[in-house]
Image (cartoon, helix red, strand yellow):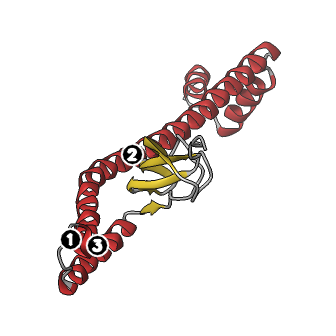
Amino acid sequence: MSTQDQQAHDAANPSPEAQASASEGAAKAPDATEVARLTSERNELNDRLLRLAAEFENYKRRIRKEMDDASVRATESVLKEMLPVMDNLDRALQAARGGDGGAPSGALVEGVQLVQKQFFVALEKCQVKPFDAEGQPFDPQVHEAVSQLETDKVPAGAVASVFQRGYRIGQRLLRPALVAVAKAPSQSAN
């Protein structure tokens, strides 16, 4: 092989030592502006990645909350349809206890009470509970006043009588109680 051929061969196929020294020469000469540009680009991409991860977490949290709210709204809708049944059971018990002059049937009252108790258990499984209103101070957030009643049995401004029980689902109000609010008896002239 001639010298020229050998030089051409060496140029086309450099030895590993020649390749290492050439890459060292290239690695030794990175320019400071290039390093600064690459560092800035890396920091910017890292920032974007962190913001994207935070946005995704917020999205997941928001979707979870929306799904929970949708579930509660669906449950509320079904339960609001069932509450009139409870009201009618209450009325049936009042009537069976002698509210209309007839002799109350013990078996009928007991049967309606058992159905009502079973209904309460089913409602509690859905986190629905009635709340007491009678004797409590009137609160427009949870009571709906339908009348006033002159009485001295409870203080003025308190709930004197409950016409329809109020219910909560968890901590939220499902339905306000329909109540009569007490007012002080009027003083008649002696």
Mark 2 or mark 1, whichever is nearer to me: 1
Q: Nearer the viewer, residue 93 or 39?
A: 93
Identified at 55% across, 41% down, the residue is 57
Say what secondary structure mark 3 lies in.
Answer: helix
- Amino acid carrying label 3: it is Gln
Q: Which mark is residue 67?
A: 2
Relative height, residue 138 to residue 79 (above, below): above
Q: Which mark is residue 101?
A: 1
Relative height, residue 63 to residue 95 (above, below): above
Q: CA distance from mark 2 to mark 3?
A: 31 Å
> Which residue position is annotated with label 3?
116
Say what secondary structure mark 1 lies in.
Answer: loop
The quadrant of the image that shows the N terminus is top right
Q: CA distance from mark 3 to mark 1?
A: 23 Å
Labels 2 and 1: the sequence-earlier one: 2
**Image check: 59 left or right of 190?**
left
Identified at 60% across, 24% down, the residue is 11
**Image check: 21 left or right of 139?**
right
Q: Residues within 10 Å of mark 3 (few under 14, many from 20)?
A: some
Labels 2 and 3: the sequence-earlier one: 2
